Image (cartoon, helix red, strand yellow):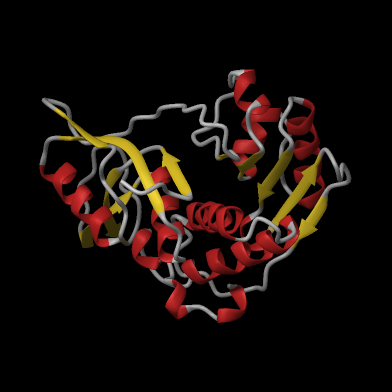
Amino acid sequence: MAAADVVVVGSCMTDLVSLTTRLPKAGETIHGHKFFTGFGGKGANQCVQAARLGAKTSMICKVGKDSFGYDYIENLKKNGIPTDFVGQAENVATGAASIIVDNEVKTLFNPAPALADLDPQFYIHSNIICCNESEAEILTGITVCNVKDAGRAGLVLLERGCKTAVVTLGLEGCIMVSAKEPIPKHVPVKKVTAVDTTGAGDSFVGALAFYLAYYPNLPLEEMLKRANFIASVSVQTTGTQTSFPYKKDLSQDLF
């Protein structure tokens, strides 16, 4: 297999989505009006978004030897993602598997789901750690309600050893802070009407990985602005991977 510029180690899973008019009470059966399945898993989502922007990607994961697993492998192939390192486990349902690889490349770490007692090595070996508000709160103990709070959380992440911290803030964009520029900086995003925010964070991380691999000389702030925009496109359509934009559908000013 040819070398990939973006290697994602993470999870693949099938999303089962039911749409109802309200949440049921305990023990209650209610009518639903739509049900569908989709492809998810944070690692795979990020890999798909990077691939749709034109990155040469590779996915390292394991799925079950079941219908969902076979379908997922076909989904990766349809998105132009090699499956050489996608394993299938006997007698195990398709779920998530995570492997840490030390391969001397720039590391973008998305700590999801976050752990309060995350191994310190993850901070030390991460060039960039990128998390959302709730993940930042779990990691740092700081409640993130606004841009200022996000900046404080980012500084704590820096103190733990990462070189750059990015905290995403949904429709408010994100903040960035680094060892070289220790004053938190807000990177806003143009307001849009959100239809479905599922997977927006993965779209953002996948886009950021693409820019890190293909435009390494682009200032990080500019990378974040572009990743913000791409994620904002994804929230204007329903679904997770189905909402991720392709390079051909985006303004060429982004490339």
Q: Which residue shows up at 41% across the image and 59% down it?
A: 51
Nearer to us in this view, 179 or 130? 179
Q: Is residue 174 left or right of residue 208?
A: right
- Residue at the front extreme of this rendering: 2
Q: Is residue 136 left or right of residue 248?
A: right
Q: Is residue 193 left or right of residue 14?
A: right
Q: Is residue 236 above or below residue 4?
A: below
Res 227 quadrant in image: bottom right
**So how many labels did they put on this image?**
0
Nearer to us in this view, 100 or 95? 100
Q: Is residue 236 above or below residue 104?
A: below
State the image coordinates of residue 77 (x, y, percent, origin top left). 24, 56
State the image coordinates of residue 8 (x, y, percent, origin top left). 43, 42
Q: Which residue shows up at 66% across the image and 53% down it?
A: 169
Q: Is residue 70 left or right of residue 216?
A: left
Res 12 quadrant in image: top left
Q: Looking at the rendering, in which quadrant would you find the C terminus? A: bottom right
State the image coordinates of residue 129 (x, y, percent, origin top left). 64, 39
Q: Which residue shows up at 48% across the image and 52% down it?
A: 202
State the image coordinates of residue 100 (x, y, percent, origin top left). 46, 27
Nearer to us in this view, 167 or 48? 48
